Amino acid sequence: MLQKKIDTMQKRQDELTKLFKRLYEDSVLGRIPDEQYRILSQEYTAEQKEIQEQLPAMEQGFRN
């Protein structure tokens, strides 16, 4: 059960990296307004931070 949650979080972390790259490209190319970029960027950053804070503890718990 814990391993499945870890795998899901790692997958989401990879997805967020890809989304961030795509979001940045869309912003640079003028495909999305600056305000939309700012909002999405903040949301993705907050989610990434949460995962980065939780994942190491979960992985440590799984190893023990």
Image: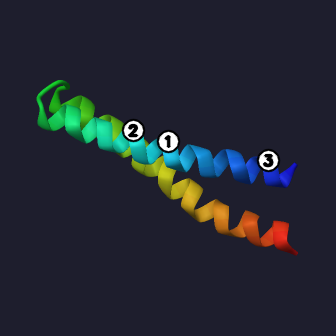
Residue 17 horizontal side relative to residue 31, left or right: right
Report which quarter residue 44 is drawn in.
top left
Q: Which mark is residue 4?
A: 3
Indicate the secondary structure of the residue bearing disc 2.
helix
Residue beneath disc 1: 15
Report which quarter residue 3 is drawn in.
bottom right
**CA–CA distance between discs 2 and 3?**
22 Å
Q: Residue at x 62, y 52 (%)?
A: 10
Residue 53 position (above or below residue 24): below
Q: Which mark is residue 19?
A: 2
Q: Residue at x 76, y 72 (%)?
A: 60
Query: Residue 6 at what x, y percent from top left?
Result: 72, 54
Q: Are marks 2 and 1 in contact (CB under 8 Å)?
A: yes
Indicate the secondary structure of the residue bearing disc 3.
helix
Amino acid type, callout 2: Leu
Query: Residue 39 at what x, y percent from top left?
Result: 31, 36
How many C-alpha atoms fall within 10 Å of the one at disc 1: few (<14), some, or many (≥20)?
few
Amino acid type, callout 3: Lys
